[in-house]
Image (cartoon, rainbow, N blue to C red):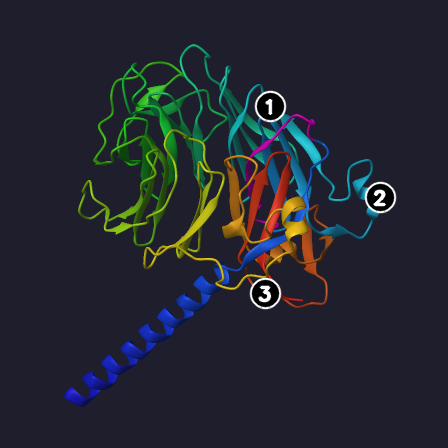
Amino acid sequence: MSGLRSMFDAQLSLGGSRSKMHHELESLSMGRLRTSRTIYPDCLPMDESIGVVCFDELDPSLMRVGGSNGSIATGSLSRARNEEAYYPNDEQGWRTGWVLPARITSLLTCGDRMLATCLGPPAQAIVATTQENISLASVTLSPRKTSLWTSALSPDLVALGCDKKVLTSRDPSRPSMDGYVTGSQRGDGAVFALDLTENLIFAGTRKGQVKMFDQRSSPSKEDRGGDAPETRAETQLSISSSVTHVRRLQDGLLVAGMDGSLGMYDLRFPSTKPYLVLEGHVNSFTSDIGLDVWRDDFVAAAGQDSRIRLWSLRTGSAILPPTNPTSPSSTSRIFSPDPSLLLRTFSEPIKALTFAGSDSLARHRRRDDGRGRIELEREGGRKGERGPVLWVGDGPGLECFEVAGARGS
């Protein structure tokens, strides 16, 4: 019996060593992310900068961006067999699908649904299909009562982050929404960050609290912006500044603060202290700064100093750039930015960044399946490696960073 146990322990140890080595190799690759292309969606107005970006879940080569003036545009990174399908748009087939009345604060897709919000006034949210520019529902909130700071989307729930509450709906076409109160009229309950699981809503507020609501409880009924009695949060975390991001991960809750704090919290033991601290994040007053997670293993966060930093979510260590990057000539350093992501200083603090699999960059043929749906067929028949690549919105442009040579052919 002891021999079998020793063999089992040895196998576990070997598996752990392999997993650790694999993560270390991935960390080295992350440090080598370099610029590979820049796209300028020319359907956007010249004075509009990109504030949010997301990829379609059903079509990995379809990208959507939201702008500072309220525009929402869609572009495909793959090529259609019929090049005339893009006319009169640019070479990436960019089209403006919606124009909302104010800055786009969130843009998400889940399955065949898309959710977008604008800050206001008037604060507005739309739920639409991803296959066509068809709005399934539109919610306009009273401009004197609230702003829309963020949103979250799951297969069966829409959640909106407002000034003092979270509004939710399982059927956005219905005239009422459920409300979870997060604060008072003083503005301390403004919801800057949202995330969802099957049963829980996580809301990060201006006051520095992360409130957790159980969707199975009985919330108040909202008239799309009206006042409601308070709904008590089951649990909450508190940090020392306003919460800018929350992400529910397999091992806990990732929380970013406006004071530059960034850490992982164990939800089994509510505490004001994270069990994993990610040091080096730079922020002191910005709520709409970019952050995204790759496969629960790495996080990328934009800083107020116009830099982007990466950390391992397993170890908490910052990802470092290569020790011997290719040194450009003094002339090229003057006229071109550093190609390395971790050495780049952008033109302004980055609001829009998102990870994607490298299949989003592969060449595909788009064909109709005969039932009115578009299918993707990878050219060459091989499936590409799965990334990661990082897309960054810098002003009016989108810049792609990937590991050189890592993309499948």
On screen, residue 279 versus residue 44, left or right, reads left
x%, y% of residue 167? 38, 26
Residue 174 lies in magenta, yes or no?
no
Residue on which the image places disc 2: 84
- Of the numbered discs in the image, which one, if any, rests on residue 406? 3
Q: Is residue 33 above or below residue 215?
A: below
On screen, residue 174 versus residue 81, left or right, reads left
Secondary structure beneath label 1: loop
x%, y% of residue 250? 33, 54
Instruction: Give the camera-side residue of 125 and 210.
Output: 210
Q: What quarter of the picture does the C terminus occupy?
A: bottom right
Does the rendering let one see residue 198? yes
Q: Dot 3, crowdedness within 10 Å: few (<14), some or many (≥20)? A: some
- Spatial CA distance of label 1 from label 3 is 36 Å
Q: Nearer the viewer, mark 2 or mark 1?
A: 1
- Spatial CA distance of label 2 from label 1 is 29 Å
- Spatial CA distance of label 3 from label 2 is 32 Å
- Sequence order check, earlier mark of 3 and 2: 2
x%, y% of residue 143? 46, 12
Q: Nearer the viewer, mark 3 or mark 2?
A: 3
Q: Which residues are magenta?
A: 44-59
Q: Is residue 171 above or below residue 246?
A: above
On screen, residue 263 versus residue 382, left or right, reads left
Q: What quarter of the picture does the N terminus occupy?
A: bottom left
x%, y% of residue 318? 38, 54
Secondary structure beneath label 3: loop
The residue positioned 46% from the left and 24% from the top of the image is 174
Secondary structure beneath label 2: helix
Q: Amino acid at mark 2?
A: Glu
Instruction: Give the camera-side residue of 117 and 256.
Output: 256
Q: Are marks 2 and 1 in contact (CB under 8 Å)?
A: no
Residue on which the image places disc 1: 69
